[in-house]
């Protein structure tokens, strides 16, 4: 047994943030990387929904760490969870909410971990310059939302865990007091687009923009709104914070770990107070603490501890 266990990282190759995490981890880890699960000392199910892409015989013969990004209680499939749980030795989670749900169904160890963000990919960008490139005038009040909001099954039903209904309720209230430009990004935004018809908003929608455009979209915002009900992240919190974009968020996911308390709000009692410069600076500093070098070093330490512990127990 080596002091530095080799790790196989399961990825989905779906263009989601987990693929970025795999690339970052492979580039930054000090641990040996196995090219196949059978050659690894540890199998890391980072894309845990793809766990059955690996042979059950291999999973049963290796220490398996499973990242559960988040759980939507109303969609939680206990049978599917228990099927995978028989192969899992340790869970990685991002929030206490996720840990609490897992604990109801499994006695496996749970480790609270954190997302990281590379600030060099999300630089602070002058607002006026960004707006010129996006097509927004200096005097517009821009609210941003770049998260999917519609279920894929019918492209009309709201993806309620993302809170698009809450976002639209807010926009209805706010538009009665001021003129708003709504800047939307991402795919499956049909629910919000349909709900906001007739509100008199100027709506700019970029379906799947490249990151260079997304950076300008963030920088163009006077305010970014995260209205989710359940999240492991979302990454918009770290991305907004590291770019010093004013953001208000529901008390979800990593929000209480990154944002200033005044940036966490009840959307139905919020009086439209904007985040202060002090709050923005606080969140910016908290986001910078989650740089990949520091965070991946911490992951490496966790992997070593888990492998050493399991080796001592003969697992």
Image (spheres, grey):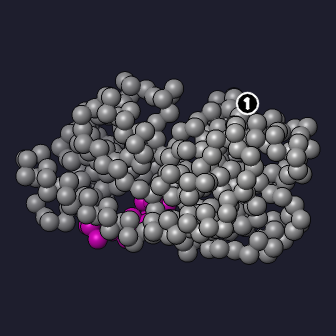
Along the horizontal axis of the image, is 124 left or right of 110? right
Q: Residue 20: percent from the left, percent from the top?
A: 49, 60
Tell me the crowding category of disc 1: few under 14, some 14 to 19, or many 20 or more residues within 10 angstroms, Cα based. some
Magenta residues, start to end = 19-34
Residue displayed at 28% across by 64% down: 300
Judge whether residue 59 can be spotted in this image. Answer: no
**Residue 60: in sight, yes or no?**
yes
Residue drawn at 20 percent across, 54 percent down: 306
**Residue identifier under label 1:** 156
- Would residue 7 appear left or right of 152 to someone viewing this image? left
Q: Quadrant of residue 241?
A: bottom right
In the image, is residue 226 part of the stretch drawn in magenta? Answer: no
Occupied quadrant, residue 215: bottom right
Identity of the residue drawn at 82% across and 39% down: 172
Provide residue 116's location: percent of width, then percent of height: 46, 62
Nearer the observer, 84 or 102: 102
Viewer-proximal residue, 147 or 154? 147
The image position of residue 128, as x and y in percent, is 81, 73
Q: Quadrant of residue 191?
A: top right
- The residue shown at (74%, 46%) is 271
Q: Nearer the viewer, residue 31 or 140?
A: 140
Q: Does the magenta portion include 21?
A: yes
């Amino acid at each position: 047994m080596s002091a530095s266990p080799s790790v196989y990282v399961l990825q989905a190759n779906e263009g989601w943030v987990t693929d970025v995490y795999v690339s970052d981890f492979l580039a930054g880890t000090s641990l040996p990387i196995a090219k196949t699960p059978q050659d690894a000392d540890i199998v890391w199910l980072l894309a845990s929904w793809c766990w059955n892409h690996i042979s059950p015989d291999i999973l049963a013969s290796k220490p398996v760490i499973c990242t559960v990004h988040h759980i939507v209680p109303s969609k939680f499939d206990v049978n599917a969870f228990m099927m995978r749980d028989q192969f899992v030795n340790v869970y990685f989670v991002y929030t206490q909410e996720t840990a609490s749900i897992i604990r109801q169904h499994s006695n496996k160890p749970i480790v609270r971990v954190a997302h990281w963000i590379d600030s060099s990919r999300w630089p602070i960008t002058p607002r006026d310059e960004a707006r010129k490139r996006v097509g927004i005038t200096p005097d517009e009040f821009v609210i941003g939302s770049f998260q999917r909001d519609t279920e894929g099954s019918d492209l009309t039903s709201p993806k309620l865990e993302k809170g698009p209904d809450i976002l639209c309720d807010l926009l209805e209230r706010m538009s009665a007091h001021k003129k708003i430009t709504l800047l939307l990004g991402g795919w499956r935004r049909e629910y919000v687009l349909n709900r906001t018809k007739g509100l008199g908003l100027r709506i700019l929608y970029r379906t799947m923009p490249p990151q260079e455009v997304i950076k300008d979209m963030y920088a163009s915002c006077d305010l970014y709104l995260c209205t989710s009900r359940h999240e492991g992240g979302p990454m918009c919190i770290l991305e907004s914070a590291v770019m010093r974009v004013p953001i208000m968020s529901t008390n979800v996911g990593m929000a209480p770990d990154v944002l200033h308390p005044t940036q966490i709000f009840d959307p139905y009692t919020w009086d439209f107070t904007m985040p202060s410069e002090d709050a923005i600076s606080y969140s910016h500093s908290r986001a910078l603490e989650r740089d990949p070098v520091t965070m991946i070093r911490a992951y490496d330490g966790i992997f070593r501890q888990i492998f050493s512990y399991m080796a001592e127990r003969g697992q």
